[in-house]
Image (cartoon, coloured by chain):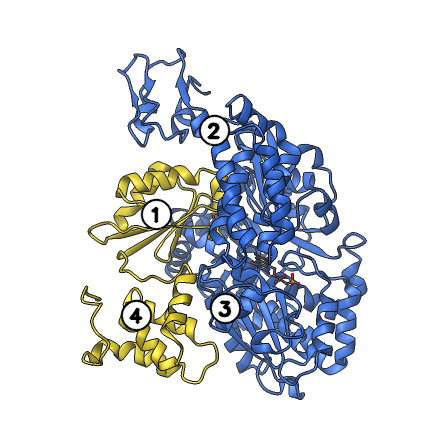
Chain colours: A yellow, B blue
Amino acid sequence: METKETQGCCCGGNKDRFAKVDEILAHYKGVKGALIPVLQEAQNAYGFLPKDIISRIAQTLKIPVSQVYGVVTFYSQFHLNPRGRNIIRVCQGTACHVRGAKAVLKALEDELRIAPGQTTTDERFTLETVACLGACGLAPVLMINDDTHGRLTPETVCKLLDRYQ
Amino acid sequence: MKHIRSHVLVCGGTGCASSGSKKVMDVLREELEQKGLAPEVKLVETGCHGFCEMGPIMIIYPEGTFYCRVQPEDVAEIVDVHIYKGRIVNRLLYREPISHERIPNFEHMQFYKKQMRRILKNCGHINPEVIEEYIAAGGYAALGKALTEMNREQVVDEVKKSGLRGRGGAGFPTGLKWEFAKNAPGNQKYVVCNADEGDPGAFMDRSVLEGDPHRVLEGMAVCGYAMGASEGYIYCRAEYPLAIKRLNIAIKQAMDMGLLGDKIFGTDFSFHIKVKEGAGAFVCGEETALLASIEGKRGMPRPRPPFPAVSGLWGKPTNINNVETFANVPDIIVDGAAVYAAVGTEKSKGTKVFALTGKINNTGLAEVPMGISMREIIYEIGGGIPDNKKFKAVQIGGPSGGCLPEELLDLKIDYESLTAAGAMMGSGGLVVMDETTCMVDVARFFLNFTKSESCGKCTPCREGTKRMLEILTRITEGEGRDGDIELLESMAKTIKAASLCGLGQTAPNPVLSTLRYFRHEYEAHIKDKKCPAGACSKLSGYLITELCKGCGLCKKVCPVEAISGEIKGQHVIDQVKCIKCGACMAKCPFKAIIKG
Ligand SMILES: Cc1cc2nc3c(=O)[nH]c(=O)nc-3n(C[C@H](O)[C@H](O)[C@H](O)COP(=O)(O)O)c2cc1C
Ligand code: FES
C-alpha cells in the first residue's frame, strides 16, 4: 500500500521507492513514444504521480521535467495528488444526460458530501465525471473502479456504495 | 466424435457484463456440469449483440432462441425447460414494445429484422477470443486474397471503386486516402487505427473491437499491404479496458498463426500491430492530435497541410482510419467492390452502424444501409419513444453534429443530406430526445463539453466556446437578454471560420442547429422566462396538486427529503431543497404531481 510520505527527495536515498518505476523504465528502454505508457504504468504502481517519480522519469527518458509535467496535466487520466481507494466515474455523456445523469451525480455528491474531482476525507472514494463510458444503452451509467453499473436512479446509486470499502 | 446438441451463447460485452452476464455464465457452467450435460452443450462467451438494453443476453442454438435480461436465478429453469425438455421459457423472451408480442427468435424481432448486419455480422455470434471462430466465419480470406492474388494498385483500386468513405466523421473517400499514402515517398510508413471513440453517445467501435477484433486487424493489414507499411498502431481509449484486452489477445493469436508478423502467407509482406492506450482527452480523436499523443506528447492538433499521408507519425507517411472503416475492408476485398457498392445511396455506399440511445425503447446498435430514413431507425428498429411521450428531436454527430426535428424524420440519411440539414454523420451516435428535453439545455450541454475539451491552442475555440457557454448558461437560468440569439449566431460564425481544428470548427453546430429548428424555445427562455420542456430547473419546479391523497410515496422516494406532509393529508414540496429529479412525479400513483 502507498503511504503519505510521497513527496520525499529524489537524491537516490530511497532506493526501494524507485524500484518500481525503474523497472517500468527499463522495460521501455529504447521504445519510441514511451512517455505516456510509462506514466500510465507508474500511476498504476504508485496510485498517482508524485513529484519525485516524475523527475525520475524525466531524467531517465532525457525529457525536460517541464515537458513531462505538460503531458501529465494535459490528459485527464493523470493525477498529481493521492486519490481514494475507490474511484467513482459518473457518466455525464449525452445519452446519460437525457436519461437523468444529473440527478444521479447530485445524489452521490450529497451522499459523499464531496464535489466531482474531490476525495472523501477517509480516502474511501474519489468522485469524478466522464463524458461517455460507451455503455449508453444502459444509461445513466457509472463506473466504480473497473465495474460498470447501469440503469441507475438517485435511489439505487447510493446503495451500490456499500460494496466498495 | 463428440456430439454437441446445443450451443449456448452468452454475451460477454461491456453492457451485458455490467448487467451480470459473468455470473450467469458461471452458474450455467455449474448447472450443466451437475446435470451431466456439459459434454453435449457448448457454452460460448461472445461479444456484443448490440442490444445492451436487454442484457444479459443469451442465445440458444440450433433454435436461435433469444432470451433477455437473464439472471442467475433463471439459469436452472432454462436448463431444465429448454435444454432438457426442448420447450421455450416464455417469460424470458423479448417483448415488442408496440405489439407486446413475445418473440422467440431474434431474426424475427423488429430490432434485428430491419438491420443489415455486415460489420456486426460476427458480433455476438463468435467467441472473439478464439481466432479459429473468426477464420471459420470467413476471416482472413481477404488478407489472403489481397496478398496472393492482387497487387497493391488493385487493392487500392478496389477500395476506391467500392465508394467506402471514412466512418470517423468527415466521410473522406478511403481509397483516395490510401492512394495518397501509397504514393507518398518513404521506406517507413504507418497504418493507424483511430479507436478513440470520443463522441458521447457512440459505442459502435467499442462493440466491434470487443466482439470481432480480428476484422479490424485484417482491415489494417490489407491497408498496410496496399500502402507499403510494415507497422500499425491502434489508439484505443483507456475507458475501454475489455476492448484493449481482446485486441491484445487477437494480435497474439494472429501472430502465432502467421497472419500477422513477418512474411505473412509466405509472401514478402510483414506487418506488426501495437495497441496504444489513450489517456483521456477528447481532442486526441482528431488525427494530428492523435499522432502527437502516440509520440508521447500533449495531444494538440496542428494545422494541415502537411496531411498525415505525407508527414504523419514521426514525420513518416501515415494512413489513419476509424475502426468501422477498417472493419468494412475485408468484405470489399472478398466480395468485390460491386457487391459492396450495391447497397447505399449515390454518394454514400455500404452500411453504417448507428448507436441508438436516449429516450427510445430499444437502445442499442443498429447497422442499416445508407439512405434509410430516420423514421425507420427510430420507430421500426428503435421501437419508438417510451412512456407515450412525444418525439422532439434526434441528435446526431455528437458535439460536432446537430439536432433534427420531427419534420426531418423522413430524410434519407447519408453524409450529404445530414450536412445539408445542419447536422453531420459524425461517428453515428443517435440520441433521441422527447418533449421533456430542453433544446437550449442540450446546446448548453454540448458547449460545456467542447469548452472543457478544447485543448487551448487556438483562441477562437478556447475563448469562443467559453463565451458561448456563458450566454447559454444565463439563458437557461432565466437571465437571457435581448440580442443574445444574434450574439450567439455571430460568435458561431467566427468560431467556425477561425478555429484550427475540427473541434472548434464544428463546436457551434449544436447551437446553430437548435437555433434553426427550435428558435422558439430560445425565445421562450429569454422573453417569457419559461422553459417549455420543463427541464431547466431555475425556470420550473414540481408542484403537488390537490389530487394528492396523502399516500406518502413521494415523500419516501425523494432523495433529498424535500417533501413534507402527514399521511392522508396534502403533501408539499420545499422548492429550495428540491433538486428537480422528478422521482416524486414518476412515483405518484394519482398523477397529482405536475411540472410548472
Ligand atoms: C475533435 C475531433 C474528434 C475526433 N474524434 C474521432 C474519434 O473519436 N474517432 C474517429 O475515428 N475519428 C475522430 N475524428 C476524426 C479524425 O480526425 C479522422 O478524420 C478520422 O480518424 C479519419 O478516419 P476515417 O477516414 O476512417 O473516417 C475526430 C475529429 C475531430 C476534429
Ligand atoms: S453517454 Fe453515458 S455511457 Fe455513453
Q: Please, which chain is the residue tagged with disc 2 on?
A: B
Q: Quadrant of residue B561?
A: top left
Q: The numbered mark 3 sits on a residue in which chain?
A: B
Label 2 to label 3, Cα distance in Å? 41 Å
C-alpha span from label 2 to label 1: 26 Å
Q: Position of residue B17 (x, y in %)?
A: 43, 54
Name the residue beneath numbered marker 2: B479
Quarter of the view holding residue A111: top left
Give me the C-alpha separation between circle 2 and circle 4: 48 Å
Q: In the figure, B37 relative to A120: above or below? A: below
Q: Earlier in the sequence, mark 2 or mark 3?
A: 3
Residue B482 against residue B92 in the figure, above or below: above
The residue identified by callout 1 is A116
Q: Quarter of the image holding residue A29? A: bottom left
Mark 4 to mark 1 CA distance (whole Å): 24 Å
Query: Residue A89 or B519: which is nearer the viewer?
Result: B519
Residue A43 or B73: which is nearer the viewer? A43
A25 relative position to B172: left or right: left
Q: Secondary structure at mark 1?
A: loop
- Could you say whether the residue bearing mark 4 is in a helix, strand or loop? helix
* Mark 4 → mark 3, Cα distance in angstroms: 22 Å
Q: Are marks 4 and 3 in contact (CB under 8 Å)?
A: no
- On residue B375, the disc is none
Answer with left or right where residue B124 lies relative to residue B304: left
| Residue B387 location (% of width, % of height) | 53, 29
- Circle on res. B293: 3
**Marks 1 and 3: in contact by CB < 8 Å?**
no
Closest to the camera, between mark 2 and mark 4, is 2
Categorize mark 3 by other alpha carbons within 10 Å: few (<14), some (14-19), many (20+): many
Chain ID of residue with mark 4? A
Q: Amino acid at mark 3?
A: Ser
